[in-house]
Amino acid sequence: MTGSPITGKKLYIQEVSVRDGFQIEPRFIPTEQKIELINALSRTGLAKIEVTSFTSPKAIPNLADAEAVMSQIERVDGVVYAVLVPNVRGCERALACGVDEINLFMSASATHNLANLRMTQEQSLAQFEQVVRHIDGRAAINASLSTAFGCPFDGAVPESVVFDLVQRYLDMGIGAVSLCDTTGVANPAQVERVCAQVRERWPELVLTAHFHDTRAMGLANVLAALRAGIDRFDASLGGLGGCPFAPGASGNVCTEDMVHMLQAMGYDTGVNLDQLIEISRLLPEIVGHDVPGQVAKAGPYSRRYPVPESVRALSGANQ
Ligand code: COA
Ligand code: ZN
C-alpha cells in the first residue's frame, strides 16, 4: 500500500452471489433456498445485496423467479436491495416489487453487449435513458459497465471507451457506476490506472469495483482498486458467479475471502466474518458442488491447531 494509515477505513461490501452466482449454476436453485440465503446474508452487515435480475427468463432461466424472491425476502434496515435490469420491461417489473436500487448493465465492448443483451451499445444506452425517465426517482440507479477491462471476444478495451461511457452515464443523470471485469482479465496495474483516472475525473461519482477471479487476479485487483481510492466492492459468497454469455467466465472474488483479507489489514467492512463463513459453508449443499472460496475451508488466519502430543513432548524435553 502507499503507506497511508488504513485502520478503521470504512468499506462497502456488496453481495452478488444470489444474482451473479446463481445465474450461471447448471441447475435451478429453488426459490425458497434463495430467499433463506438472502435472509441470512441480510443479517451479516453487508451494505448491499444484489437479489436477482429482471431479465428475460429465456436468457437467464435460473432467475425466472425474480418477483417471488424480491417480494418474499425479509428486508433488513440499512441493507440496500438491488436488482439487475437490462431494459424498460425489467425496470417495470423491478419497480413493482419495490426494489431500492436498479442496476442497469451494458458492456464496454460491442460484441459482448450483443452476445449478452442482443443490443448494440447505442441501443443499450437508449434503454438506459428510457429507464432513467421511467424510474423518475422511485429507486436509486447504478449502471454497470461489463467487460470494462477486456472482452472475451473483442480483446482489449481502450480506456478512452470506458471513460466515454462513464461520461454518457453521467450525462443521463446516473451518479453511481460499477466497473466490471466480467471474465477476470484485468491486472492490478491496469485496475489502479483506470480506477484512479475515473476517481480523478469524477470525484463525486459513486464507484464500485466488480472483479472475477477467473485468472487468480481477483484479490490483487481489489487491492489495486483500494490504492486508487475505491471503497465499494462487489463480491460473491463462496466465489460463485459468471456471465452465461461470456465464454470462459467463472466466479467473482469470494466475499468471505475478501472480507477476511480486508479485516486483517485493518479495514472496517462492517461485516461479521464468522457469520459469512457459516453461511458460505451451506453453499456446496445448495448448489450441489464444491465452491472456490478458501477461507471457509481453511478458517481465518487466527485459527490455531492443538499442538500434537509428540511435539509437546519435544518442547518438554528441551526445557
Ligand atoms: N423481463 C422479462 N421478459 C423479458 C424482458 C424482461 N426484462 N425483456 C424481454 N423479455 C421477453 C420478451 O417479452 C420476449 O418474450 P416472448 O419471446 O415470450 O415474446 C422475449 O423476452 C424476447 O424479447 P426481446 O425484446 O426480443 O429481447 P431479446 O431476445 O432481444 O433479448 C434481453 C434482450 C435484454 C431481454 C435479453 O438478452 C436478456 O434478458 N439478457 C440478459 C443477459 C444477462 O442477464 N446476462 C447476465 C448478466 S451479466
Ligand atoms: Zn459479474
Image (spheres, rainbow, N blue to C red):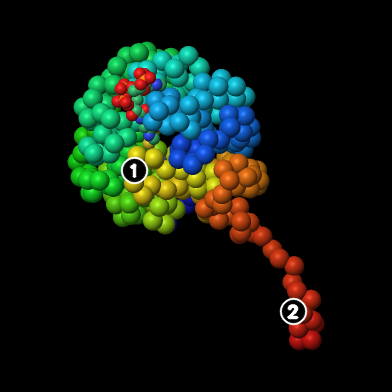
SS category of the residue bearing label 1: loop
Check mark 1 vs ligand 1: CB closer than 8 Å? yes or no: yes
Assess disc 2: are there few (<14), some (14-19) or many (≥20) residues with their C-alpha within 10 Å of its C-alpha. Answer: few
Identify the amino acid type marked 1: Ala
Q: Which mark is residue 246?
A: 1
The answer to whether residue 105 shows anywhere in this view is yes
Identify the amino acid type marked 2: Val
Q: Along the line of sight, which residue is nearer the eye, 64 or 47?
A: 64
Residue 46: give x, y in percent of width and height. 56, 36
Q: Residue at x 40, y 28 (%)?
A: 58
User: Image quarter for residue 147?
Assistant: top left
Q: Residue at x 58, y 32 (%)?
A: 30
Q: Residue at x 35, y 39 (%)?
A: 245
Label tally:
2
User: Image quarter for residue 69?
Assistant: top right
Residue 70: give x, y in percent of width and height. 54, 23
Quarter of the image with the N terminus is bottom left
